[in-house]
Image (cartoon, helix red, strand yellow):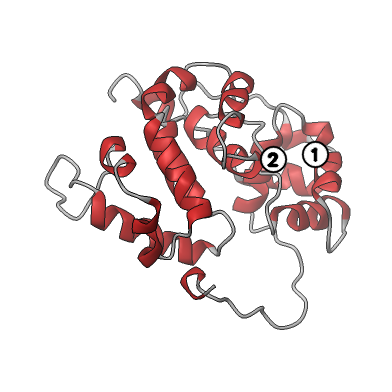
Amino acid sequence: MLEQAPRMLGVDDRTDHGLAADDHPAVARAARNGRSVRMGASGDLYHSLLPTILEQRITIGEAHHQWRQLCCNLSEPAPGPFTRLLLPPEPGVLARQPSWWFHPLGIERKRAEPLLRVAQHAAKFWDWAALTPSETRAKLHLMDGIGQWTIGNVLGPALGDPDAVAVGDYHLKNMVGSVLAGEARATDERMLELLEPYVGQRGRVVRLLRLNSAAAPKFGPKKRILPMHTW
């Protein structure tokens, strides 16, 4: 952990990406406002994958609640004086749970099985995290239940990949379309087209725009949110 600490803090991250001088005013402004933001890399794919899998198909608030329940049921306290701080569940403990064990937590089989699969292959992830982002992406694609959205969300915090974008996100495509092209709604294909000039730094651009409070316009009343356990 001590060896990984500099990478977690983003010490190795480039600061000369040139976005502060970009032709698009929104990107340049976000880059100037976020000039101290660095892309850290935890190196811990296992810890990044578990909560991200829980966020598939449901709202972020419900996913956070399920992650807390999962840790409270299966985790050990982290070392140190903060007894309420929990580690992610140990892979061996998580892998022993049958898929039906997750149902009372609101975690249906379609998400429970990838959680179990990640736990079963956890020993490989440290080696995978030492690969290039493209190589790690290819490895993760081999696992059922781990798709573009999940991979795009974990490669940033785990590997510090500045180009990782979560394709398939419900809100992200609209935010990018609105900020970069003035389009209230967009598709994933349109989002990638707008981000094409920033290949190599697409994830950084998205992160800076979000930190600069970029958002797509909202229309009409909010949809009613049905908790997963009622489906």
Q: Position of residue 101 (x, y in %)?
A: 34, 57
Residue drawn at point x = 67 percent, y = 39 percent: 165
Q: Which residue is mark 2?
A: 205
| Label 2 Cα neighbours within 10 Å, binned few <14 / some 14-19 / many ≥20 | many
Q: Is residue 19 left or right of residue 164?
A: right
Q: Please say if the residues under marks 2 and 1 sit with CB atoms less than 8 Å apart.
A: yes
| Label 1 Cα neighbours within 10 Å, binned few <14 / some 14-19 / many ≥20 | many
Tell me where residue 28 sits by quadrant.
top right
* Residue 195, above or below 77: above
Residue drawn at point x = 61 percent, y = 27 percent: 137
Instruction: Give the number of the disc on residue 68.
Output: none
* Residue 2, above or below 112: above
Q: From this viewpoint, is residue 162 visible? A: yes
Could you tell me the amino acid type at mark 1?
A: Leu
Most extreme residue toward the left is 81
Q: Is residue 221 left or right of residue 95?
A: right
Most foreground residue, 125 or 179: 125
Q: Position of residue 98 (x, y in %)?
A: 35, 50
Could you tell me the amino acid type at mark 2?
A: Val
Q: Position of residue 22 (x, y in %)?
A: 79, 36
Instruction: Give the number of the disc on residue 195.
Output: 1
Question: What is the C-alpha distance between the residues marked 2 and 1?
Answer: 8 Å
The quarter of the image holding the C terminus is: bottom right
Q: Secondary structure at mark 1?
A: helix
Most extreme residue toward the bottom is 221
Q: Earlier in the sequence, mark 2 or mark 1?
A: 1
* Residue 207, above or below 8: below
Most foreground residue, 23 or 97: 97
Tell me where residue 139 sits by quadrant.
top right
The quarter of the image holding the N terminus is: top left
Q: From this viewpoint, is residue 48 visible? A: no
